[in-house]
Image (spheres, grey):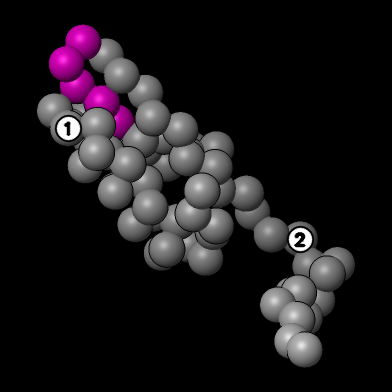
Amino acid sequence: MHSELPASPGTRMPEHRIAISERGSFAHATCSCGWYSPARRSRDLARREGADHLADNGGEAG
Ligand SMILES: [Zn+2]
C-alpha cells in the first residue's frame, strides 16, 4: 500500500486554477493567482502555457 497524501495537510497553499479565455481567434490562459499567458492563436498552446505555469508553481494540472 502507498499513499500520496501531502505530508502537511494543514499547509496553506496558493491556488492555481487555469482557465482558457478566448477572444476572437485568439486564446490565452489565465490563472486564479492573477497570472496570464500572452494571447495565442492556438487554444492548445494556451493550455500548454497554463500547464507550464502550474508546473512552475507546484499546482495541479487539470
Ligand atoms: Zn497561478
Q: Say if 35 sits above or below 53 in the image.
A: above
State the residue at coordinates (24%, 31%). Answer: 43
44 with respect to 8 (left or right)? left
Work out whether 30 lies above or below 14. Answer: above
Residue type, label 2: Arg
SS of the residue at dot 2? loop
**Residue 60 falls in which quadrant of the image?**
bottom right
Residue 54 percent location from the top left of the image: 45, 56
Q: Disc 2 or disc 1, which is closer to the eye?
A: 1
> Which secondary structure lies at badge 1?
loop
Main SS of the magenta part reads: strand
Residue under the point 34% across and 57% down = 52
Q: Residue at x 29, y 48 (%)?
A: 49
The outermost residue toward the front is: 1
Q: Position of residue 16 (x, y in %)?
A: 55, 48
Where are the magenta residues, as a range?
A: 24-28
Is residue 47 something that shows in the picture? yes
Between residues 44 and 19, which one lies in front from this camera angle? 44
Looking at the image, residue 36 lies above or below residue 22? below
Q: Quadrant of the N terminus?
A: bottom right
Whole-Å distance between the Cαs marked 2 and 1? 34 Å
| Residue wearing tag 2 | 12
Q: Residues within 10 Å of mark 1 (few under 14, many from 20)?
A: some
Q: Identify the mark at residue 42; answer none if there is no mark.
A: 1
The answer to whether residue 33 shows anywhere in this view is no
Crowd rating for badge 2 (residues with CA inside 10 Å; few <14, some 14–19, many 20+):
few
- Residue 4 x/y as whole percent: 70, 77
